[in-house]
């Protein structure tokens, strides 16, 4: 399959101008010389010194045909007599392999016989973006990957996973449990060595396909790259009273919510990007009360990382339905989050982790305590927080200013999370007001004008220094195991590949 992709994307012909430049598609869909612009869509092949557009040169080399004229075998141009410059094979394919064993002489690049990385052009159409290349390598470690910065997934391998680059390696060099695998007897192996196509992580070389989603919050214009849940689902009111990037504080995102919440069917603030497959997201968060001098003073006023199953059926409020916690299929809200602020103790910094499955929310609250001093005052409302998704497992991590290494804060399994998730940032505040105005009425809360009434007391300003995406490189011995089993998988093992700075 990959061989034919190479063949059909590239061609070389001699133009009437004497150039042997690669032909390029013009705006009408035809092919033109990149030197003179002459249309060669009918595949005229000229030998050196031959100036005729309609006659064969008669020298026994490449034949040229008039526009629209079919060759003997029904292809656009006949193969040369000596088989070295084969522009069409007898079976109607576009190109034959040349006598020297390279893939084809119409390609700008040939594969080396030793299986080492080839010299693919940086703009080959084999990859998933405009600056990609699929590379043939003798070993996986030696194989560079060039993934598109927007993470739009290569489509070379039939079974490939979205948002990863691919490398082509000999079967003997591939792990036995390598998946997904798209076997091809010669794939990109020029000497017939059986190959498999593997998904390559950043550790295999090249750029991380998720890196382009990251935001350093030093440019206000990047706000447009984020989606807002109230807009995507057609809710009438923005639950953020304040939102800016690189404005109220240089290099930071600021979010100040109205009284609102995420709990069961109650829907709150979410600013997100869509991410497919495994990921690691990291942010530096700082939370304060609105006065800016301490911890929030209202119940459940926090901000942090939020990961949610999209509810694509909601485009207006009338589409909304409450969830069914007894269902074994997606029905309602499904999400995970890790946030910092004040939870059930006003005026005190805490963390909250919440797992919601079909609108059934289970939360865990922690007062941060320094394991060395048994003191929590070192947490001044700032921390690095991280969430890693590995299949259906979600690892919550946190690192306070005095922590020498990342803490594995919580581990979860969520069986209703699809390949593509909404991954982003949330803030919420003032649960007392929400429960007072809309007790047991999540839809009323979700559709309400803001503020909820004149007596609400929102008390949170959350700031984020950056939001960074990365593709995890999961060790082979941890693939397919239960990552919630802290006896079978230690914190140290998780930190070994997730605890990077």
Image: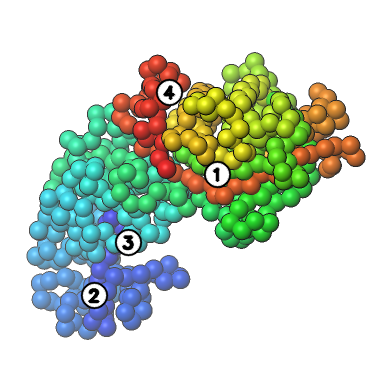
Q: CA distance from mark 3 to mark 2?
A: 20 Å
Examine the rendered structure and indicate whether residue 375 appears above or below residue 429: above
Residue at (72, 43) in percent of width and height: 293
Q: Are marks 4 and 3 in contact (CB under 8 Å)?
A: no
Tag 2 or tag 1, which sits nearer the N-term? 2
Which label sits in the foreground, 4 or 3? Answer: 4
Tag 2 or tag 3, which sits nearer the N-term? 2
Foreground residue among 262 and 227:
262
Which label sits in the foreground, 1 or 2? Answer: 1
Looking at this rendering, what residue extends furthest in the right direction? 454
Tag 3 or tag 1, which sits nearer the N-term? 3
User: Which residue is under mark 1?
Assistant: 284
Q: CA distance from mark 1 to mark 4?
A: 25 Å
Q: CA distance from mark 1 to mark 3?
A: 35 Å
**Circle 4 Cα neighbour tier, 10 Å, few/some/many (<14 / 14–19 / ≥20):** many
Residue at (23, 59) in percent of width and height: 119
């Amino acid at each position: 399959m990959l061989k034919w992709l190479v063949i059909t994307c590239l061609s070389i012909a001699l133009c009437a101008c004497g150039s042997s430049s690669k032909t390029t598609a013009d705006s009408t869909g035809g092919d033109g010389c990149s030197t003179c612009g002459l249309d060669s869509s009918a595949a005229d092949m000229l030998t050196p010194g031959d100036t005729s557009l309609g006659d064969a040169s008669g020298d026994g080399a490449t034949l040229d045909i008039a526009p629209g004229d079919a060759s003997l075998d029904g292809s656009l141009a006949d193969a040369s007599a000596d088989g070295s410059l084969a522009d069409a094979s007898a079976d109607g394919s576009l190109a034959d392999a040349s006598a020297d064993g390279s893939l084809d002489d119409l390609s700008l690049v040939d594969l080396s016989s030793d299986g080492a990385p080839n010299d693919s052009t940086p703009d080959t159409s084999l990859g998933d973006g405009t600056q990609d290349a699929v590379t043939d390598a003798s070993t996986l470690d030696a194989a560079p990957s060039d993934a598109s910065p927007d993470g739009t997934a290569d489509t070379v391998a039939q079974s490939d996973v979205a948002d990863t680059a691919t490398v082509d390696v000999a079967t003997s060099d591939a792990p036995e449990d390598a998946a997904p695998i798209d076997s091809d007897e010669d794939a990109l192996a020029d000497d017939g060595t059986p190959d498999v196509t593997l998904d390559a992580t950043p550790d295999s070389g090249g750029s991380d396909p998720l890196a382009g989603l990251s935001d350093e919050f030093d440019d206000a214009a990047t706000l447009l790259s984020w989606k807002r849940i109230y807009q995507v689902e057609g809710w009438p009111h923005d639950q953020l009273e304040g939102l800016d990037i690189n404005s109220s504080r240089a290099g930071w995102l600021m979010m100040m919510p109205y009284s609102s919440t995420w709990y069961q069917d109650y829907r709150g603030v979410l600013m997100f990007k869509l991410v497919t497959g495994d990921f690691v997201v990291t942010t530096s968060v700082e939370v304060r009360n609105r006065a800016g001098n301490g911890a929030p003073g209202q119940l459940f006023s926090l901000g942090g990382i939020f990961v949610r199953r999209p509810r694509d059926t909601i485009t207006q409020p009338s589409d909304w339905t409450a969830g069914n916690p007894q269902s074994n299929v997606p029905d309602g809200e499904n999400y995970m989050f890790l946030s910092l602020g004040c939870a059930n103790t006003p005026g005190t910094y805490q963390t909250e982790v919440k797992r919601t499955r079909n609108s059934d929310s289970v939360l865990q609250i922690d007062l941060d305590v320094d394991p060395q001093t048994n003191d929590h005052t070192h947490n001044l409302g700032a921390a690095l927080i991280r969430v890693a998704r590995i299949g259906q497992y979600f690892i919550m991590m946190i690192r306070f200013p005095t922590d020498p290494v990342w803490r594995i804060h919580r581990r979860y399994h969520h069986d209703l999370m699809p390949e593509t998730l909404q991954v982003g940032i949330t803030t919420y505040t003032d649960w007392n007001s929400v429960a007072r105005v809309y007790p047991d009425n999540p839809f009323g809360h979700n559709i309400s004008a803001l503020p909820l009434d004149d007596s609400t007391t929102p008390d949170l300003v959350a700031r984020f220094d950056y939001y960074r995406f990365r593709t995890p490189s999961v060790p082979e011995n941890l693939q397919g195991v239960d990552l919630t089993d802290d006896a079978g998988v230690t914190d140290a093992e998780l930190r070994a590949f997730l605890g990077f700075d």
